[in-house]
Image (spheres, grey):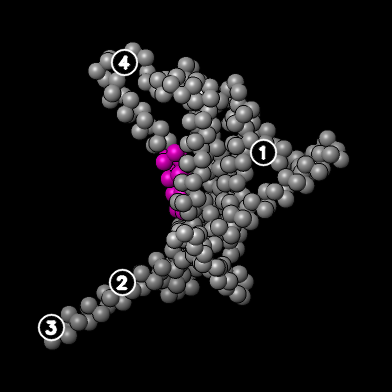
């Protein structure tokens, strides 16, 4: 008799675990990258490619990065054409000018200071690419490329090289690395401080990558989890509450998409300013 009860409990636990795993799988299916592109009524299988043994397959996130790139190129093309017709911006041109001026006057100029003009094109590119990629993930059947650690890490690595290049161009290679160590440090502490400062150079892009990746992933997981409660609990009574909370988080995600583009750009600009003006 006890063996039958134990078997019943075990079967129940296995069923619960299986349901939890399937629920988690459903959530991660919508968050993680994949080789399929889901469109209304159809699913497109993306091609698998390799070059010299390296997997260079086209994935869902790659497709949405291309879409972000195409949208930005098209948008700025028409904005530039509108300026040729009139110097007074209207509609979309007015919005784009507002964002460009914001990045220039509120991010680049205060954090970099003199010589910020050299880095402004990069900062604008990063800002608009992250912003558009974040918003694409909020659309139905969309995917957030910035929730992929490979994408955020690549952006952080590019920022890392821009930071080092800016510091070396301004101070010279020897002067830049010498300036990493604060003045007045005892001689016996110099080797330790040098190692610490070198590690600090790499922790900055690491923080950029993890911050953007974690924030863009977390919001989508919360939305999916809230909607998934309807199916996990097998009742429609929880649907109004789940949908209301999911809608609230979705509206927050719109704000987070803006904030994360701003934070990544601002921190990149701040690190560039610290590298360029080491004496300040």
Which label sits on residue 99? 1
Q: Which residues are magenta?
A: 205-219
Q: Earlier in the sequence, mark 1 or mark 4?
A: 1
Q: Secondary structure at mark 3?
A: helix
Please, which residue is most extreme toward the right here? 85
**Is label 4 or label 3 in front?**
4
Can residue 274 be seen? no
In the rendered view, tell whether residue 72 sits above or below residue 159.
below
**Residue at left offset 45%, top offset 19%:** 175
Which residue in the protein does label 4 denote?
185
Real-space CA distance between mark 4 and mark 3, rounded to the nearest whole angstrom: 73 Å
Decide if residue 147 is in sight here: yes
Q: Which residue is mark 3?
A: 2
Q: Which quadrant of the structure image shows residue 141? A: bottom right
Q: Nearer the viewer, mark 1 or mark 3?
A: 1
Out of 94 and 115, give the one closest to the viewer.
115
The image shows residue 263 at horizontal and vertical percentages of: 52, 38
């Amino acid at each position: 008799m006890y063996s039958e009860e134990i078997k019943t409990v075990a079967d129940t636990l296995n069923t619960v675990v299986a349901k939890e795993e399937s629920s988690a799988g459903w959530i991660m299916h919508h968050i993680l990258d994949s080789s399929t592109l889901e469109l209304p009524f159809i699913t497109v299988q993306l091609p698998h490619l390799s070059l010299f043994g390296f997997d260079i397959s086209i994935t869902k996130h790659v497709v949405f990065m291309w879409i972000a790139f195409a949208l930005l190129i098209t948008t700025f093309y028409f904005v530039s054409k509108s300026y040729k017709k009139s110097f007074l911006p209207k509609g979309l041109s007015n919005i784009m000018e507002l964002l460009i001026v914001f990045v220039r006057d509120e991010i680049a100029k205060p954090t970099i200071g003199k010589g910020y003009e050299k880095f402004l094109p990069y900062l604008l590119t990063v800002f608009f690419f992250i912003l558009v990629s974040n918003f694409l993930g909020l659309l139905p059947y969309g995917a957030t490329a910035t929730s992929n650690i490979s994408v955020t890490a690549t952006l952080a690595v590019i920022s890392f090289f821009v930071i080092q290049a800016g510091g070396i161009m301004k101070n010279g290679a020897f002067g830049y690395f010498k300036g990493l160590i604060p003045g007045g440090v005892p001689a016996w502490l110099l080797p330790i401080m040098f190692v610490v400062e070198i590690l600090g150079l790499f922790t900055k892009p690491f923080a950029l990558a993890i911050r953007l990746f974690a924030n863009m992933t977390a919001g989508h997981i919360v939305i999916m989890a809230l909607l998934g409660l309807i199916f996990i609990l097998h009742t429609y009574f929880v649907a109004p509450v789940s949908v209301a909370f999911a809608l609230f988080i979705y509206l927050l995600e719109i704000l987070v998409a803006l904030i994360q583009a701003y934070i990544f750009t601002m921190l990149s600009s701040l690190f560039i300013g610290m590298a360029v003006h080491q004496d300040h």
